[in-house]
Image (cartoon, grey):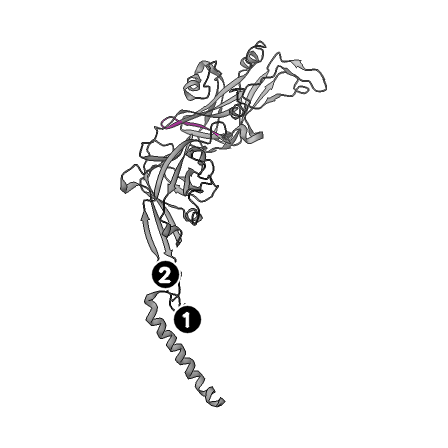
Amino acid sequence: MKALLNRTRPLLLATVVAGAVAACDESLESGLACPALCPEQPAPVRDTTLFAVALDTMVGGFPPLGTEAELALTYRPDTLETSVIVRYDSLPESFQHVNVPDDSTIERVDSAFIKLRVSRSDTLGPPITVEIFNVDTVTAGEDTSATVLGPLFIPSRLIGSRTFAGVEYRDSLIVPIDTQFVLDRIQLPPDSVRRLRLGIRIRSPESAEIQVFSSNFGAAAPLLYLRVSPDTLNVPAVQMGPTSRTPDNRAVAADLADFQLITFGPAPPLPEVLRVGGIPARRVYMRFTIPEEIIDSSSIIRATLLLTQRPVRDAPRAQDTMAIQALRIHASSVVTDIAKALLFIALGTDSTVIVPGDSTVRLVEIIDLVKAWRLADTAITPRAIALRSATEGIDGRFVDFFSNEAPADVRPRLVLTYVPRPAPGLP
């Protein structure tokens, strides 16, 4: 009997397997039959294009005035001119000799200069002339706007200048200031406002720009140096960093020790356009609506945002490349102010390279952002992203995209490639 079983076992096994495979063949149309015995059937890969942007808008003013880490000095007469305002609202009245306990009153200024630390520059660029103006004003109220400060950049208020070759402005710029002007400010009566408020700009035979560090960069801040005695061995130079005593709000005043001023710039974008970048920079906010059967019940393998670019001819460096980033917004739905929500963005390194003067459809990959929305409660975490320039606030380049207000064929679209998940169940 045992020998008979040994001889018939292969035949019985083959019969069982053949029956199972036949059963699977009969039920392949039904989906999940015979999961243990049948090879898994590949799920279909689907592509869909959606007008998924429920809300898009842009907000300007990044970084906020006075919070810039770098300040741009730009001279592009056809597109953009920027200046820098630096305030020294606490001028000294006295100085110290080495090893002398008592202070001495400042009665002379032998030399005065401002030192700017260069953060970015083109050392092969044209020569530039750095000009410094007295932009102090007694105008009450607003004292940070280009409307008030721009007209003060005039020859009668010029108090210092120096020309640099391209190779000379790769590290720092030292520009002398009129010593008598500084001394007159120091020696004003006690009830007067003793301060220096300087406007700095560049001029060049060609278009030029450099960036300098602001006081937000610590030791690299624009520094004012005064030599108040011919005895340079025993009397070191008086050194001052930027300070501001206006407005009355101390936190705001601290930010306004130095800041960016735009004296001439491109025209504002059209109503149906979203602008990314520029000075001051704009960010774009986009909130998405995606069908739940796709985002929660599928494996999304690719997500591409299609943005139709509107060419800009009057942008600074319109034919040079720039990079934009699509970043996740961490603000919850409690934050209803879009300008504030755009402050809560995740840092990222991925970017899309763009030429502002082009006219084309740009593909921005956002797969990681879309995956992060899966199973997230939209009442708590809106499905929103921010678009920003990778060099935000540093240079004036910007790019324009058509918004939801534009004709349908150029509106933002979202292309999703995904695999539907099989519905749970038994054969």
Q: Amino acid at mark 1?
A: Leu
Q: Please report whichever mark, 2 or 1, sits nearer to the chain's N-terminal start.
A: 1
Quadrant placement of the C terminus: bottom left
Q: How many residues crowd around disc 1 within 10 Å: few (fewer than 14), some, or many (20 or more)?
A: few
Say whether residue 78 is magenta: yes
Q: Is residue 23 above or below residue 375?
A: below
Numbered range of the magenta stretch: 71-80
Q: Relative to the observer, which residue lies in front, 248 or 257?
A: 248
Picture layout, residue 265 above or below residue 10: above
Residue 90 percent across, percent down from the top left: 58, 18
Q: SS for tag 2?
A: loop
Q: Main secondary structure of the magenta part?
A: strand
Kindly identify which numbered label has been placed on residue 43: 2
Q: Is residue 86 above or below residue 288?
A: above
Q: Quadrant of residue 267?
A: top left
**Element under disc 1:** loop
Label number found at residue 118 = none
Magenta stretch contains residue 9: no
380 or 344, which is in the foreground? 380
| Above or below, comparing residue 102 to residue 17 in the picture | above
Label 2, label 1: how far apart the Cα atoms are:
18 Å
Q: Is 14 positioned to the left or the right of 219 in the image?
A: left
List the residue tagged with mark 1. Answer: 37
Q: Residue at x 38, y 75 (%)?
A: 20
Measuring from the top left, give residue 175's x and y in whole percent.
52, 22
Q: Is residue 184 left or right of residue 373?
A: right
Q: Position of residue 378 (x, y in %)?
A: 42, 44
